[in-house]
Every structure is written in C-alpha cells, then in structure tokens.
Image (cartoon, coloured by chain):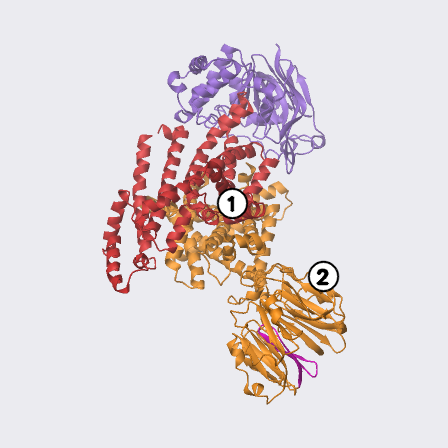
Chain colours: A orange, B purple, C red
Amino acid sequence: MKKESFFAKLGRSFKSLFRSSVTGKKEINVLEEEAIQSPMRTIIKNFFSNTLAKVGLIGFIFILLFSFVGSLFFPMDPLYTEPILKNVQPGRGYLDYGSCDVKAEDIKQLASGATFSVVLTNDGKLCAWGQDQDDVLEIPSNADSGIKEIAVGDRHILALTNSGSIVGWGRANWQQQNLPVSIKGMMRGKVVHVYANEEYSAALTDQGYLYTWGSVTSTKLDIIPDDYQGHIVDADAAAMGMILLMDDNTVRAIGSGGDFKNYPEELENGEVKVVSVKAGKRNAMALDDEGNVYAWGGTSFNLDTVPDFGEKIVQIDSGKNAFFAVGESGKIYGWGEDAESILDIPEDFEAEQIFVDFFQGYAISKSGEMTAWGNEGFILGTDDQGRDVLTRLMHGGKITLLVGVIAVLISSAIGLTVGMIAGFKGGWIDNLLMRIAEIIVSIPFMPLVITLSYMIGSSMDSQSKMYLIMIILGLLSWPGLARLVRAQILIEREKDFVLAARAMGIKEGSIIIRHIMPNVISMVLVDMTLSYAVMMLQEAALSFLGFGVQPPNPSWGNMLNKAQQATTIENYWWQWILPAVCVLIAALSINLIGNALGDAIDPKSNEK
Amino acid sequence: MAKLLEINNLHTYFETKRGLIKAVNGVSLSIEEGHTLGVVGESGSGKSQTAMSILKLFEKNQKIYDGEIKFQGKVISNYNAKEMSKVRGNDISMIFQEPMTSLNPIFTVNRQISEVLMLHQGMSKKEAEQHSIEMLKAVKIANPEQVNKSYPFQLSGGMRQRVMIAMALACKPKLLIADEPTTALDVTIQAQILYLMNELKREMGTSIMFITHDLGVINQMADDVAVMYCGQVVETAPVDKIFQDSEHIHPYTEGLLTSIPRLNTDRSSKLEVIPGAVPHPLNLPKGCKFAPRCKYATAECRENEPELKEVSPGHAIRCFHPVKRGKQ
Amino acid sequence: MIKYSIKRILSLIPVIFAISIVLFSLTKIMPGDPVSMMIPTSAKPEQIPQLREEITKQLGLDKSLPEQYVAWIGNVAQGELGFSSWKNDDVKNVIANPLKNTVILNFFVLIFSLTISITAGIRSAVKKNSFVDQFWQVFSLICMSVPTFFIGLCLVFVFALRLGWLPSNGMPVDGSGLGEWVRFLVLPVITLTITSLASTVRYVRNAMLDALSQDYIRTARSKGLSEKVVVYSHAFRNALIPIVTVVIAQIGTLFGGSMITESVFVWDGMGSTLLTALNRRDFYLVIAMNMFYAVVYLISNFIADLTYALVDPRIKLD
C-alpha cells in the first residue's frame, strides 16, 4: 500500500516534468511562454534549438541504423574466414566486365583470381578488371598480344603465347609467376596448357607431361607419378591438388587434397569416358561424354552430392567451394558453399558457356549476351582473415553499442541507488558507501578492469566474456555518479524552495519526489549519456588490448586488435582506421548529445 | 556649484541573441561636487547599468551606443581601457551590493587595499600597509591591524562592507558610486554603514552616487534624487522637493512614495502598491514606458513618449500629466 | 594544516588495507597455476613432485589464505613485495625498471599537459567564443571521443611509418644518450598529452570562467587594475584551487591511463609489465602493480588535498 503510493507519486513527479502548466489558450509572447513552460518542455526546446545537438542526434541515429539495421541486411557468420581474400583493399567492380569493352562472341577464355578477372579474346589480346593486388591488373607489354591461353591463380596470372612461351605476373612470393629455368630446361614437348591456383602454377606439354612450380612442396604437388606423365591431356588446378584427365579419358589426381584421390572407380577404370575435369578446394568433379556429372571428395557443403539435373550437362566449372554445371537447355546449376554470393546464379539465363573461378562467375548466352555473378568486391576491404570489413563493422557496432548501454545501465542503477541512499540517509551508511566508492575509485580503472577481465574471464567463451565485460565496466563505474547524486541531493535539500516546502508542512517524501528528484534525474540523464561514450571507449580499449570482447565475435575494439602490428598499420589502413572512425563518430555523437542535454537542463553552464 | 559628473542622453545596450536590450535608454543626470545623488528605481530600471557605464565596467556584449559622460569637464565615456583604469579606483570608485562576494576570498584585506594604493598613489608596500590600516581605522574598524591581516572569510558582512568602503576611499576619490551598498545587510548594520558614509562624505568632500530601491534610505542620504524607470530618468529633483514641497510629481514616484509603509499611517488603510510589473527590456511598450501601469494614463501616453521637462527650477519630470500633489 | 594532513593520512590507511584485501582475494581466484609455470622445462618427470613442493613452499602457497595475506602484507609493509614467478626475481626488482620508464613518460606528459592546458584554458576563458576558444572546445570534444590508442596509431602511421622520422615503438637501448630517449619518447608523450588535454583544457577554462564571473573580479576592475592583473592574479589564483585538485588527482589516473599507450608503443613501463604479468599468471606481480597504482592514486589525491589547502586560505587557516 505504502509502496504503491510512493510509485504513484514518483509517476506524478515524472509527469510534472512533461506537463505544461499553461491551461488557458491565451496569446502569450515568447518570454512569458518560457516562464511558464514545464521544465521538460523547456529542456526539449532548448535541446532542439542547439545545432550541435541535432548533429549529434543525426550522427547517433546514423550509427544505430548502420549497426542494427545494416546488420540485418548483411548477415554474418562469425566463424567464416577466407584466407585467399585476406587484406583486400576497399573497392568494388570485381564483376565489372563492361569496363573491358569485349564482345561476348570474341571471348576465348575468361578466368578469375581472388579479386579480379581477366579475359582473353579470340585475337589473342588480354584485358583485366577488379581489384589490383600485386599489380596483377598491369598486363606486361610482352603479354600484350598473341596470347593463346591464360591461367589465373589467386593473385597471379600466367599467359601462354602463340610461340609457346609463358609470361607471368602478379604475386611472386613463391616465384609462381615465373617458369623456373630448371623446369624449362628439362621440359618434354611444347607447352599447350597452363594452370594456376593458390600460389602455384602448372604447365602441360603436347607430349602429355605436367610440370608444377611455385608453392608446391607443402601440398605435394611437386610429386607427379611417372606413370601419369606422358598421358595427361588436361587438368584443373585447385588449392591443394590437381585433377588430371588422362589420354584414355580416365581421371587421376595429385597433391595433398587426399579426398581428391577417392574418385569413383568407373572414372579410373575407363568404364565412362570423361571429357572434362574440375576441382574445388577439397572436391572434384568430372563430366563424361554422355553428359553425366560425377563429384567426389569431402562431404562439406554437400559438394559430393550431384543434384538431379533432369537433363544432359554440357559444361562443368568450379569455384572455390562451389560446383557449377550448364545443361543442354542453357540452365546453370550450382551447389556447394554460398560464400561471397557465388551461388546467386542468374535465373532465366540461357548459358552457352560459363567461366567460374574462386568467387566470380561469368556466363555467355547463345545469343551473345553476357552476365556475371558472385563477389562484386568489398566497399571497405577485408580483414586479415578475409572477412568483409563492412559487415564486421555493422555487427561489431551492435556489440560495442550494446556493451556500452548495458554497462551504463548497470553503473547508473547502482550509482543512483547508492547516491540516493547516501544522500538521504546520511550517517554511517553514507560514510560506508562513500568509503566503498573511494576504494573502487582508488584503483586506476584500466589496470583493474584488465586484471578482473583476465582473472575471471580467461576461460570463458566469447559470448560470456562479452557479458562479463558489460558487468565489470558497470560495476566499476558507478562511484562517480553516486557522488554526483549524493552531492546534488545535499545541495537540493538546502535550497530555499525545499526549506520553504518543509516550512509549509509538506511531507519529506513528497518534497523528495516533487522537488529534489526531477533535478537529480535530469542530472543522471546527462551523466548517463556522457558515460555511455566513455564506456564505448573503454570497451574499445579493452578489446584492443585483447581483454575485452573476444573474437570471432567482432566489436569495434577487437577489430583494432591487429593494429598492434606495424605491418597492419602501414599496409592495411582500412582495417584499423575504419573501426576507430566508427568509435569516434559514435562517441562524438553521444558526447554532443550529452553536452547539449547538459546545456539544455542548465543553460547557465553554457552562458558562463 | 560646479558639476562633478554629467551624463547626457546615455544609451547603454546589451547585444543578445534575441535582440538589443536597452538597459540604459537616454539617461541624463548630473552630480554636483560634494553632493549625494540618490538614484532610485525598481530592479531592472537601469540604475546599476548607469553606474557601470560611468566606470565602463561592461560585460563583453555591452557598450555605450550614444550619449556622453563628463567627469570634471572631461568626456570620459570615450576613454580607452588604459585611460579608464587611471580613473577607476582613483577618481571614481565603487562599492557593491554583495559584500560577501565582492572581496577576493584568497587575498588578505591588506593586499586588496594596498593594491589600489600602490597602483594609483605609487606607494611602497610598507607605506601602503600603513595607509591601509589607517583607512580601516577611518571606517571605524575597532581592530584595524588584525583585520588588515585577515582574509575576507574571517569577517562578517558589515565588516566586509566597511573594508570595501575603506578600499574605495583609499585614494580619496572625487566620486564614490555606491550600488545598493546596504541592501544585503542587517538593518542595524545598514544604519551604521549609512552613517559612516555620510560622515566620510563630510570629512573627505567626496560626492556620492547612491543607488538604491529604498526611498527611505534616499531620504537619509541624498541631496538630489533621480528616479529611474525602464532605463530612463523619469524625474529629477532635490530630495526635499520629492518628499515634501513640489507641486507636481511623476505618477511613478507617487507610486513609490505611497508604497513606503509608514509608522504613522492608519493600520486599517491598505498599503498601496503599483500594479503590474516592470516590462521586459525586449518588450518595451510604445509611448510612455510607465503607461501600462499608470492609473492616470491617457491615449496620448500610450502613443507618444514624453520628454523630461523642467516643471520648476531643478525639478524635471518625464510625464504628460504630472500628478498634482494636493490631490492626496 | 598539520592536523588536517594527519587526518587525511589516517583516513588513507583503512582504504589502503581494504584495497589490499580486495586485490589479494582477486588474485586468488585467478586461473592457472603459478607453481607449474615456475618448474623448469628441463626438469625430469620424477623430479617434478618434489620441485612442485619446494616452489609451493617458497611462494608460501602451502599456508591458509588469511595466513598468506598476513605474511604478504607484513612483507609489503617492509618493502618486500613478493616473488615474481615470471622473472624469478623479487617483485621490487622486476618493477624497478618499468617504474622508472613509466615515471619518465608520465613526467613529460604532466609537464606538457599542465603548461598547455593552463595557457590554453586561460586564453579560452578570457577570449570566450573567440577562435582560440572554439578551437580548444572542438579539440577537447574530439579528443574525448577518440580512443587513446587510435591517436597513437595515427602518429605511428604518419611519423614513424610514412615519414620515418621517429621509431614506431620500443625503448632506447641501455646507455643511450638523451637524444635517443627523446626520439623514443616523442610519440607516446604526444599521445598521452593529447588525451589528457581533452579534459584539462576544458577544466581550466571552466574554472577560469567561473572565477571571472565572480563579483570580486568586478571589484578588481573597479579598482583600476589592469586586465592582466585581474586575469592572472585575481582570477587565476582563485581558479587554481579547483585546477590543482583535478590536475594533481589526475596523476593517479595518468599512470593507469598510460597502460594502453605503453602497449601501443611497446614502452617497457608498468602497463606493459602488468599485461605480461597477467599473461604469465604472475600474481604477486599483478597485486604489486595494482597496489602500486592504487597507492599512486591515493598519494596524488593526498597531495592534491594538501595543495588545495595551501592555495585556499579558508582551509589553510582552519
């Protein structure tokens, strides 16, 4: 009963904050109006008349939309990583074949690397587009014309000229772009085909001999059984292995991709005549002369399960973890991992030929039209694990903003309660509470938070650690507010109007609720806003040091964690500047709002 | 007698975001040597701002827009900061309403009084200290040596105001501006301070511009009176004319006079008050500023603004229809 | 004054005790076993149980918790801060060098931040709403909204990696001259100074504005004092009272706050030592570090109180 009336009064005091005391609708001028407006209305009016407040509000709404709405549109699998797309610069246009001005009927071959594609025309010319990494888009002058065939690795390109020599450019960490002299010297026959994939290259001669170079030892691609050599007519290169098509239309495999070698018996013993082979990361597939598709290898993403097409297949191709087939009708089928939109195959497109590599797919129709699907690029680049920075910024923002809010709610709840008890009760309770506050304040914040986070949370998973951070930040940040509230109450209690109310015989409880609480509450609101910004910065700092939100869940702070290395700072600016700028925009907006709120509540503080 | 200070048509405005606040809006008055001018008016009537304009103690957004101030025949209203600082505290000094906060809390009384003496009189520290004690003696402080060494927080309000007066008179200024010096003090202390000021004025021959809202105090202190309303002088007269024998009087002055409670009035008669409030400086009425509150106001009063007109020698009124005294 | 100081000192003692108890119990819930970390990898399996017992005894871990606390606090009082399992040395020896480095770093930061914030704060207050004032307002707002380490990273990016003028991180080698120290100090000092300026400039400005709006300033002007005397003598001396409290009390926070900067610049100070100590589960070191931070904070608060009393006659004469 008593409690209820307390809350009723509290409600009334809140309402009185909003209610205007103007009842009669008389013409009143600005000054008079100001004098009789309810406090909350004046505050709101003051707030919105402040330009900076509006800027802050817009900034904060933008950040909210970016994080909470944006992350709905860009879902994220925190565990997904893609090494070949790591540290990609910001930029789009990976599928921008239009920039090359090549007609579909002129295309002889089209191949893609991790972030770019290159086209070979019927008259032997090359053209490339996409994200330039390792100068891969700069076609050297000796590959300008007279090209017969191309092969594209993740970040390098090989071109086979009409004269049979190989020109390579792009990433050179394993010399994969450069046919080694040692191989050149012992090569049997003339090169007719070239192949490339992650950091290695291969060449096949007219005598059926295959040679590999680049990063091949760790994947055992340098071991090609002698009985294969001389019988190879075609091949396909994948990250860890190559699948070979032999002169008897059977299939063989090399490399460390163990599952490659588990090809169906009929492909090995010549029961079916294979005409084409393709390989993905751990899987491979083959097409026979009757239009049947065979797939084998690892079971991930159901790549080994060939869908029921209901028609003859005329062409197969493979991305990194996705397989594609073109039916007689021109329909394109795809299955496997839907990473980087590679399975967003255009519907109702009658394809004659498709070219798929890594995460880019292109198709040419019988009528000479062209289309593309897959990875268009990364507006804000990728991080050191090949994850889209934009998506992680959105999801990271969600976490950073939430951690801050909950920490502020915890600390404000404690701060307000402790401050009120101390302020109203006084005596030994006040003394004790303020001593506790002093102890907490005495240990510098960062070291203590880090110590606690480490001691309590070192064996926690990413999710619980996140909650732990919220709680630690909240539990250690209340003393400031508690002191403020206590001081405010002590000041308010001595104010003339409170004394007057007391003299008029108004009950203590009602004085507190009517006269003291509105002032305290508005002060708490300002403090909450300002400490929200502080909390976000704390989270960022903690996570930056590795003691906050743990990967793989992103937060703006832990996205900055890698920036402790000079290479990241120097080479991959988008990985550390962008999250920091997000923190800056969010904290700045909140600070602007907080300052404006403070000024709106106490205009004098600004006039001074 | 020679005029010590003459203010002609002074306009001092504040520039605010909402517009110009005409705090002083055409004030003309003069103070004769050795006289006390009482400036009276409600709060917001511009009396303090007139005083501040004399010493140019302005806020950042405040300045003189028109008019001039002459002191001993020299126009001081266009003095620059350096010239002005030679006048301040030396020729003209000022004491304020709030003795509790007008002294610097972290300096001793000695330091605060000596500062003026060293600055204007070129005294050494020793001389200044000696003189400071003398000044404290002059303002009737019982233990000047001890007070001289004290910090303001160790002194009572009355004592602080005495220190303020000692400080203001340290350089024997020609004019002392006292801005409601006794408002914040207890009545007994108030009387002591007023007595002290009168005595010092006699001894030193200093003129005083005494600003107050209390007509009773004016009666005790002033030789002449200027009544201010809304940044204008509405009536000037020798003090006895206002209180006794003038034929005419400004309706506002009349209002002020009748609102003084008197011991000899019948207890059953109600105390008269002036209805309404001082208009907001951003929202001044057209015509006579007092018209909205004036019981004698006519259509003319609401349309046109009256001039300050002399009705008898030394007595000027800003009103179309001055009240005849006999009426009461 | 003396009575006041003694009162303040006495009131610190229970706080220090409480902090030490809190810290000591915290370290006890720290996961990991410091003993196994101290067993040399070269030890043969059959030696391990015996070694373990010896080390446990050496660390005093065989006693009950209150006993361990009493033993520890007794030693602390004598300046024995415990034994670091990470460095295999006394904590006080382990701390000595990082402490020196952190003090050097923060000393410069304090000097710069004080000088700049006081000059800038006064100018902003005197010329309110002028360009200077607005510049510092915007500066503080942005610096309050930017993570400290980001300032550091940007400085590293520009001055160390792009322009190559200064080392990106690390410490000068032993026996380096002053020039070398300066080269390594510049960036961390700038980073920390900027961070601390964000709040101090504002604080000085507001304190000055507050002082300048007081009645006694009007009195000072009415006495004919020049604007310089009014601002620097009358107003600033009064503004100094709140400034001193905050700025000196900030020293404590500065030590804690320099942790992140130390980590960015791989500065071998208290902050980096604490991080390593945590990773090595070196809990005596961890407590000692946190105790150190707390003591620095309390001492700086105490000094602030004393300075406050010195500047303000109202307390001095009490």
Q: Secondary structure at mark 1?
A: loop
Q: Is A460 on the left or on the right of C217, as rendered?
A: left
Magenta stretch, main secondary structure class: strand
Q: CA distance from mark 2 to mark 1?
A: 40 Å
Image: magenta residue range: A312-334
Given the image, on which type of amino acid does mark 1 rest? Pro
Q: Position of residue B134 (x, y in %)?
A: 43, 13
Front position in the image: A338 or A465? A338
Residue B248, quarter of picture: top right
Q: Which residue is mark 1?
A: C167
Q: Position of residue B310 (x, y in %)?
A: 67, 18
- Residue B187 shown in magenta: no
Q: Is residue A260 above or below residue C80?
A: below
Q: Position of residue B258 (x, y in %)?
A: 55, 26
Position of the C terminus of chain A by quadrant? top right
Q: Is A378 on the left or on the right of A407, as rendered?
A: right
Q: Which residue is mark 2?
A: A141
Given the image, on which type of amino acid does mark 2 rest? Ser
Chain assignment, label 1: C
Q: Is A126 on the left or on the right of A515, as rendered?
A: right
Q: Secondary structure at mark 2?
A: helix
